């Protein structure tokens, strides 16, 4: 399996990349600038002790992968998707974006489509299976490779097989996935991130998360 | 402490009433019909084995209490609040309502104020301290008195002292409160209920809930 992480040089990308690479997955870091992607991939390979990651410009990274994760800030959501629309056709896109208000990350913007995930699905068309995941996992916790993460990963999207592909990738990262159904649920899952950021600020922590209780094991 | 539960004859009210009464709190069940409130209070007293609950019409219940909880369906949210506006002045209102779509309780309506809680605060004015709580706790779990509930209670509202009053009441019910800050967070907390209802349906359970991880103990 080859997974690319577009915007993988940002906050969320490196932790995801290292955890997947450690599980034997081939990971490509994507960035607007190829040289930046290559530099971060080299750093991460050094940390990993093995040359498992590559860096590429976003379109090449999208073209080379079977599954593509998108971890850019919401301000770059639409433009990044437009730049890789062709390369994503026939693939699964994991949308990690959260439409936070840049003025106050404890609050949400409301995309006309309802959520970033639904916006991505509209923009990319039915040829791409968009799945929301990883929004609620703290970048700080993801990056702390030496310990586990006490946070479930809510996974939603309109294609059941694509959800399963992503849930398998969540498990390979050592995290617990929860099947949260159709894409409209991304409205809640994305907005949970704003609540968790507010809890981090209020309670002076960096890695609050969420566990869903009462489900069958 | 005297707590009234308006709409207390519905799904959420009886479990809350019994758990508070068991902790020694005086509880008044409110309903549009006084006779219905009295009948439910009598049933619950029998279950409790002690005559700790009373039933009253909503306005009398609101007038008699120090803290008032509102557990009506969202379709009755505005009309109930208008009927007790005067009686609530100077008090804490715990808004438990969730603006679920009556056509599909896995989806939310979007109240113009942003959330039921913010709508209540607008409608009642600054003389009433509105606090959101208990939206994510399954009625089924609340009613099962013989066991604990694996679900945090997210508490938000614009008045810090009122939030503390409600967090104390959450603890007296044997549940764990999380201070979730200002009232705008009710948008997320209320919408989480729709997600949990979807998870209940998808995973064939009755009591999914949520725990916040990574906070100081």
Image: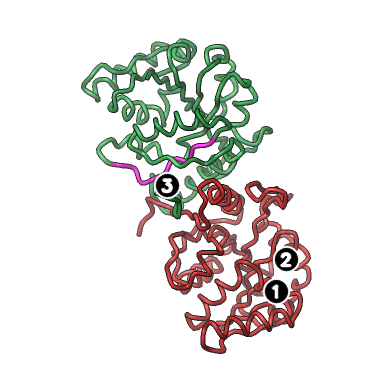
Chain colours: A green, B red
Looking at the picture, how far across and down is residue B90, in whole percent? 66, 75
As drawn, the label of residue B81 is none
Element carrying mark 3? strand
Give the residue pinned by disc 3. Answer: A209
Query: Are tags 1 and 3 found on a single chain?
Result: no
User: Mark 2, chain letter?
Assistant: B
Question: Per the image, is A183 magenta?
Answer: no
Say if A100 sits above or below B42 in the image: above
Q: Magenta segment, which residues?
A: A148-156
Say if B195 sits above or below A49 in the image: below
Element carrying mark 2? helix
Please report the residue visible at 73 percent of the width from the left and 62 percent of the height from the top: B77
Q: State which quadrant residue B70 falls in.
A: bottom right
Image-based side of A165 in relation to B46, left or right: left
As drawn, the label of residue B124 is 2
Q: Nearer the viewer, residue B117 or B47?
A: B47
Looking at the picture, how far across and down is residue A28, in whole percent? 38, 17
Number of residue marks: 3
Tell me the quarter of the image containing the N terminus of chain B.
Answer: bottom right
Give the residue pinned by disc 1. Answer: B89
10 Å neighbourhood of mark 1: few (<14), some, or many (≥20)? some
Q: Nearer the viewer, residue B105 or B175?
A: B105
Task: Kindly indicate whether the residue at mark 1 contacts the one at mark 2 (C-beta within 8 angstroms).
Answer: yes
Say if B13 sits above or below B27 in the image: above
The alpha-carbon separation of the residues under discs 2 and 3 comes to 33 Å
Q: State which quadrant residue A12 falls in.
A: top left
Please report the residue visible at 47 percent of the width from the left and 27 percent of the height from the top: A71
Question: Per the image, is A152 magenta?
Answer: yes
Element carrying mark 1? loop
Sequence-first disc among 2 and 1: 1
10 Å neighbourhood of mark 2: few (<14), some, or many (≥20)? many
């Amino acid at each position: 399996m080859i997974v690319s992480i577009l915007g993988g040089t940002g906050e969320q990308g490196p932790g995801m990349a290292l955890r997947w690479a450690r599980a034997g997955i081939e990971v490509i870091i994507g960035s607007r600038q190829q040289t930046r992607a290559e530099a971060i991939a080299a750093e991460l390979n050094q940390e990993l002790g093995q040359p498992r990651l590559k860096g590429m410009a976003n379109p090449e990274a999208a073209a080379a992968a079977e599954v593509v994760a998108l971890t850019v800030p919401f301000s770059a959501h639409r433009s990044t998707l437009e730049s890789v629309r062709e390369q994503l056709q026939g693939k699964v896109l994991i949308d990690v974006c959260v439409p936070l208000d840049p003025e106050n990350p404890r609050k949400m913007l409301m995309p006309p489509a309802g959520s970033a995930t639904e916006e991505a699905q509209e923009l990319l068309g039915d040829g791409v299976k968009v799945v929301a995941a990883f929004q609620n996992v703290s970048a700080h916790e993801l990056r702390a490779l030496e310990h586990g993460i006490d946070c479930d990963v809510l996974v939603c999207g309109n294609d059941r097989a694509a959800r399963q592909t992503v849930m398998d990738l969540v498990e390979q990262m050592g995290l617990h996935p929860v099947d949260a159904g159709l894409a409209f649920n991304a409205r809640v899952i994305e907005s949970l991130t704003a609540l968790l950021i507010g809890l981090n600020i209020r309670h002076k922590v960096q890695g609050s998360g969420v566990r869903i209780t009462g489900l069958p094991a």
